[in-house]
Amino acid sequence: MVRSRRFDVRRIDVNKRVMTGSESEEPKLRRAVCPGSFDPITNGHLDIIARASKLYDVVHVAVMINQSKQGLFTVDERIDLIRRATAEYGNVEVESFHGLLVDFCKQRDIPAIVKGLRAVSDFDYELQMAQMNNGLSGVETLFVPTNPTYSFLSSSLVKEVAAWGGDVAHLVPPFVLEALTERLKNKQ
Ligand code: ADP
């Protein structure tokens, strides 16, 4: 009898050790990473993470630590907001990283980077990065076309509009809006 390889990804313990076919009867978990600054997470990021979480067993969200750039939120605060925003997906892990993304991938046995493409203007730089990463370690980059609803959306635009009192409630989860309003109030 042929045993089905299908299984419910929502029931996977994402902390469990990755096993190769020879070590276990269990299938090897298929992993991907969504990297970025997420300062803060927006509905555009979430759309890409949600779609990746349907394609992969485990999606790692990697929050880049950039020592030369002060964010509005600390890395820990960003991680907390992303964890809350993605909790319902059931197969998303959130971590920070600094250094090369390909090293992050190597350490966790992640063969794929998933990125959202908003517009043609994103493409030039993303293509260069994808080719560089592939040349460095063989990791593949998959581009997901942004939901048109969010094609203009970026964390920096959200911060700028919110700082001037504009309404961004439809662009971020409610608890991100709350954190954003609070942070901008304290900055004034
Ligand atoms: P970066 O520091 O690379 O600008 P961001 O946190 O702004 O990081 O975004 C990280 C990644 O999330 C982007 O490279 C892109 O793949 C995706 N992304 C950002 N905004 C959107 C959006 N509005 N729609 C779809 N994907 C997005």
Image: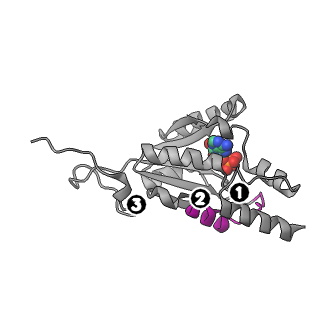
Look at label 2 and name its amino acid. Phe
Tag nearer the camera, 1 or 2:
1
Query: Circle 1 is placed at which residue position?
Result: 39
Amino acid type, mark 3: Val
- In the rendering, at what x and y percent does residue 10 appear? 38, 55
Badge 2 vs badge 3, beta-carbon distance below 8 Å = no
Q: CA distance from mark 1 to mark 3?
A: 25 Å
List x then y, in percent, for residue 39: 71, 57
Q: Earlier in the sequence, mark 2 or mark 3?
A: 3
- Give the distance between the C-alpha atoms of the residues marked 1 and 2, in whole angstroms: 14 Å
Which residue appears at 67% of the width and 38% of the height?
149
Q: Which mark is residue 97?
A: 2
Q: Which residues are magenta?
A: 68-84
In the displayed structure image, the side of residue 57 where residue 50 appears, left or right: right
Alpha carbon distance from label 2 to label 3: 18 Å
Q: Is residue 120 above or below residue 93?
A: above
Q: Residue furthest left?
A: 1
Q: N-terminal of the two: label 1 or label 2?
A: 1
Q: Residues within 10 Å of mark 1 (few under 14, many from 20)?
A: many
SS assignment at label 1:
loop
Q: Residues within 10 Å of mark 3 (few under 14, many from 20)?
A: some
Which structural element holds mark 3? Answer: loop
